[in-house]
Image (cartoon, rainbow, N blue to C red):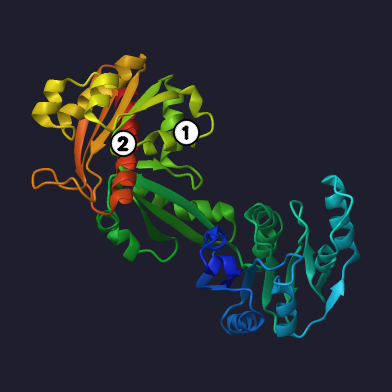
Amino acid sequence: MIVELISVGTELLLGNTINTNANYLARMCAKLGISNFYQITVGDNEDRLFNVIKTALSRADILILTGGLGPTEDDLTKEVTARVIGRRLVEDLDVKKSISEYFRKSNRKDIPENNWKQTYVIEGSTVIENHNGTAPGLLITTDDKKLIILLPGPPRELIPMFENSVVPYLRKLMPGTFYSETIKICGFGESQAVTIIEDLIEGQSNPTIAPYAKPGEVHFRVTASARDEEEGIDLVRPLVNELRKRFKDNIFTTKEEENLEDVVVSLLEKYNLKLTTAESCTGGLLSGRIINVPGASSVFDEGFITYSNDAKEKYLGVDRETLDKYGAVSKETAIMMAEGAAMSTGKDAGLAITGIAGPDGGTLKKPVGLVYIACYLRGKVQVEKFNFNGDRQTIRERAVIHALNMLRLSIINQYEK
């Protein structure tokens, strides 16, 4: 089956709102084994939206439209969809009751008149209840057996509606099932990682391996078409085991929802370790990634941003002699930053980054992209030199990822081997 995603809203075209819905729906459809060839963004214009829907129906089995279901005049998705497929809009009294109940629970007695626009649904459609807003979703089967799914734009409304109502519906439409596992690795570029498993990619039809590159990471999704989930697991397992054998400790997780920082925080918790960070060129990005993890306060409660030499000397105890002789961007300084961070706070681990993120400041000996990362862990310290490509933000993000991975590997090597 082929799905086409249509995002409706002028605010998306203008860049005022980031279109996270398309990203989310594309990933969810891929998990379901539904092919996605086109993603379209269209403004709140009746004629253009009409043409977009009509074209999509000519080349896809399923259309998922997001946005444009609200109470205002420029919310046109439902009305235009009805016109394209030749259906009427009819009032749904259950939806009217739900809207009244929503306002009652919000302690709002006066319901704006335009909200009743949302009580009208496309004739013959199935209503998807919205427990986080007023605009219902709709499932419509056209006369030529195409499926159109209308969902509201706010992610807090769309995501639970899709997962609770749409996914089960789509699963019933799919013959058999698709089962996937994701392998996430650090320490390899995409081309290098793909080369290592080139024979597996070329030699497999079911299951298949699809690589996805992220800054500093490569993800492999292994997907099998099967009669049921049990058969899918049996098909995927040998390939996953082969990937484990080839990438070993470079695999940091096989959980789709788990990020590198989640894994690092879990390891710190597992071995009752406390961490302090010391950042120069990353300016807090590293500590920010760690703090993104719920419960990180159990392993991380303070860090240092020491952008200047004076700050490195004052807070981390980096020798002025070291700074003068080797410079702020050097392995010697990185080591002293990591050790100083841990020693000054009495923590088990210190993780330090110093580098030249650019666009200025580079020299022939120390070019833009040069970064040193050091990790101190209970008396043992290691340091690595990196030369990252990209703009300032990319260099900083790559440095953070490699720092987290260095700490992860340090804990594994010290406590699990």
Q: Foreground residue, 204 or 221?
A: 221
Question: What amino acid type is highlighted by mark number 1?
Answer: Ile
Question: What amino acid type is highlighted by mark number 2?
Answer: Ala
Q: Is residue 44 left or right of residue 364?
A: right
Residue 100: image location, x then y, percent: 88, 55
Residue 188: image location, x then y, percent: 27, 49
Q: Quadrant of the C terminus?
A: top left
Residue 126: image location, x then y, percent: 79, 68
**Residue 186 in sight in this render:** no
**Classed neighbour count for the residue bearing mark 1: other residues with Cα under 10 Å, few (<14), some (14–19), many (≥20):** some
Give the number of callouts: 2
Q: CA distance from mark 2 to mark 1?
A: 15 Å
Q: Quadrant of the N terminus?
A: bottom right
- Residue 110 position by quadrant: bottom right
Residue 403, numbered label? 2
Residue 117, numbered label? none
Question: Which residue corresponds to the image point at 54% horizontal and 58% vertical from the top-left?
Answer: 20
Q: Earlier in the sequence, mark 2 or mark 1?
A: 1
Please tell me whether residue 242 is drawn above or below residue 1 in the rendered image.
Answer: above
Question: Which residue corresponds to the image point at 21% horizontal and 31% vertical from the top-left?
Answer: 383
Please tell me whether residue 15 is drawn above or below residue 77 in the rendered image.
Answer: above
- Number of the front mark, 2 or 1: 1
Question: Which residue corresponds to the image point at 71% horizontal and 58% vertical from the top-left?
Answer: 165
Please tell me whether residue 162 is drawn above or below residue 59 in the rendered image.
Answer: above
**Residue 197 in sight in this render:** yes
Q: Is residue 184 left or right of residue 138?
A: left
Q: Which SS class for mark 1?
A: helix
